[in-house]
Amino acid sequence: MRDRPNLLNDKAEEIRRSIFKMICDGGGGHIPASLSIVEILVALYYEVLNVTPATICDPGRDRFILSKGHACVTLYAVLADLGFFDKSALDTFGRRGSILGGHPDMLKIPGVEASTGALGHGLPFGAGIAMAAKMDNRDFKVFVVMGDGECQEGSVWEAAMFAAQHRLDNLCVIIDYNRLQAMDELDKIVSVSPLADKWRAFGWQVKEADGHNIKELVDLCTALPFQPKKPSMIIANTIKGKGVSFMENEPIWHYRMPNGQEMRVACNELGIDPK
């Protein structure tokens, strides 16, 4: 029997193939932004979160919020793989009548806790859920995955102050720190550096990680809170477009579809039959 970390790495590669196929078949989507968070979601859903299709309505379940909703295909692939809805739905992504649109809809998709896409809303949503858990004396955890570009939003910092003020140590934010956003490098638009120091100044306990190292992510997410009475922050250093060489660290690919030759290269690198 192969060890668990290797199996999870294989799962991450499987999810990457599903992402690429879903978006290409659907005619559009955010490929690089979705590829950069694969290991984060695999670590959470396969090792950390205590939510399953059978417990999705359990008040004591952990909550996961994908604040960077444009990367929803990663969440779709994971939820379908775990049985929250039938895998056949993945073949309908982006098509008329599908439950799977360009941003996640909590009213249509089993397992989706929040409808997201307008950046800067996921953390306020998560902080409110974490506060409600404290008020109800429940011990579940709330995880929010944010994009680094979201840290340019004022609503993020309002929620950050709120979470620290109310000692929400049941809240953990993971920032997909790939240093790119839609049009260019993050620091060329509105710099958020030094990111870790900013969050510490707002009262959070911060740790950094390799965002593509599943074991490291699992170890951190199972050691929460990092400090009692403080919300936890993981800055996950990632590569936007991870797994497709010509997309990696290239802003132009934020929302662009590959041509025929690029498609063949990407399929070869991801292990997909181009047919």
Image (cartoon, rainbow, N blue to C red):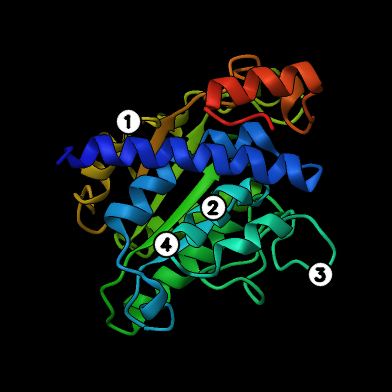
Label number found at residue 77? 2
Q: Amino acid at mark 3?
A: Gly
Label number found at residue 80? none
Whether residue 113 sits left or right of residue 205 in the image: it is right
Residue placed under numbered mark 4 in the picture: 82
Labelled pair 3, 2 in contact (Cβ < 8 Å): no
**Label 3 to label 2: alpha-carbon separation:** 18 Å
Q: Nearer the viewer, mark 1 or mark 3?
A: 3
Residue at the location (21% across, 51% down)? 222
**Label 4 to label 3: alpha-carbon separation:** 23 Å
Q: Is residue 208 above or below residue 159?
A: above
The local secondary structure at tag 2 comes to helix
Q: Earlier in the sequence, mark 3 or mark 2?
A: 2
**Is 157 in front, or is 247?**
247
Residue at the location (36% across, 79% down)? 55
Labelled pair 1, 3 in contact (Cβ < 8 Å): no
Residue placed under numbered mark 1 in the picture: 213
Residue placed under numbered mark 3 in the picture: 97
Q: Quadrant of the C terminus?
A: top right
Q: Amino acid at mark 1?
A: Asn
Residue 111 in view (yes/no):
yes
Q: Earlier in the sequence, mark 4 or mark 1?
A: 4
**Label 2 to label 1: alpha-carbon separation:** 19 Å
The local secondary structure at tag 1 comes to loop
Residue at the location (72% across, 24% down)? 263
